[in-house]
Amino acid sequence: MTKLTRESILQVAMRRLHEYGLSGLSMRGIATELGVQPGALYWHFANKQLLVAGVCDELMAPLADQQFRDPVAAAMAIRECLVSVPDGAEMVASTIAFGLGAEAAHSCLVEACREANQPAELASTALHLVLGEVQHEQQRAQAVALGIEIGSESVRASEQTLRTGLQALFGGRHEHC
Amino acid sequence: MTKLTRESILQVAMRRLHEYGLSGLSMRGIATELGVQPGALYWHFANKQLLVAGVCDELMAPLADQQFRDPVAAAMAIRECLVSVPDGAEMVASTIAFGLGAEAAHSCLVEACREANQPAELASTALHLVLGEVQHEQQRAQAVALGIEIGSESVRASEQTLRTGLQALFGGRHEHC
DNA sequence: ACCTGAACACCGTTCAAGT
DNA sequence: ACCTGAACACCGTTCAAGT
């Protein structure tokens, strides 16, 4: 087949992520789909976390092309990247926490805060807020897919909820005072 | 030994959680520590998620004794519960998302919002913010424990960062206008 | 340099069979 | 009612050995 490279591995990983979510990113599953032994992957990636980090970088790549003057807009763009794939928020959250990638998310928020004269500390607050909310909705979606009946709140309107929260965070409720 | 019951299982699970974090909550590990076969646990808990949900309920139990008039105070109390154990935020986040427990966290925030005349929608926003921030710091702590060198930001001051974010969310920056 | 083969040390879950 | 024994179908990772 095609040669085994970092790129071909990430390509298959991306495909499986779209189809199966995070559980599709097993080293053995990826190796099988590439027609190769599991151990072969370890020549190109030292461990699974680094492979996942590579996937996360691809996931957040669209952010690099954009410029934001508003941190709310930046955060919503991050959300767009995260929801483009199942379990996106969980993956990116752990990759950022381990310091292995996806720094595009944080840096575009920092810049947007500067552009809008918002305090820089709110950048990471906004990031964790986006990650937390999207992770919540994606886990709920997964629960529903597994046939678990969810009580309390409905599953819709998550986008609007996030925007409202972000606007409150950045002083939107008092912008006319 | 002692009889195998829901309570004795949760007690051992709690002990292992304190010592090993989420990775200590394997069905096989818990069973071994109880001197019993792995399958035995499934008579008392239908699956692992429900066992974890039981642990989460115990973790958030302190919230039931308290009354909050300020959503920031409520959120900080939730934080206190989460950090009392490694991986607390990750566990509680997934338990809440699956609708299997830990609803004390959400309900105490809702009540605090009502008490302080804050919009009720901000309750879940605040909850996700707390979960997101604590999950971030706990994952970082785990990375450090594994010897992974963390770049960028320092690991300290997470509590103050969260409080500042919450105050911004609830209009603290404009309270004197 | 790059991959195979095979092992090591784990998982969650199920279920007939025992008591 | 409650637990054992044993299996099923998985994991991530390592590493000598091959090419």
Image (spheres, coloured by chain):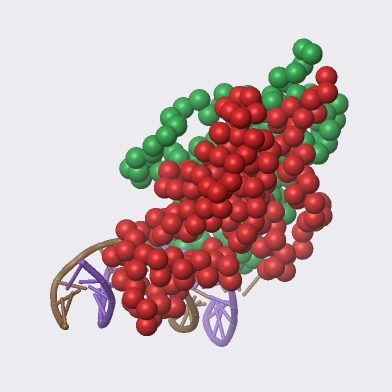
Chain colours: A red, B green, C purple, D brown
Residue A57 placement (x, y as % from top left): 48, 53
Residue B18 visible: no
Task: Identify which residue is drawn at 64% across, 47% down.
Answer: A77
Residue A97 placement (x, y as % from top left): 48, 43
- How many marks the image carries: the answer is 0
User: In what quadrant of the picture does the C terminus of chain B appear?
Assistant: top right
Position above or below: A32 against A81: below
Residue A7 placement (x, y as % from top left): 40, 66
Give the camera-side residue of B35 and A29: A29
Task: Identify which residue is drawn at 72% across, 20% down.
Answer: B172
Residue A49 figure quarter: bottom left
Residue A10 visible: yes
Residue B75 placement (x, y as % from top left): 68, 31
Give the camera-side residue of B6 and D17: D17
Give the camera-side residue of B60 and B12: B60
From the viewer's perspective, tell me whether residue B77 is left or right of residue A42.
right
Task: Identify which residue is drawn at 51% across, 44% down.
Answer: A104
From the viewer's perspective, tell me whether residue A28 is left or right of residue A153.
left
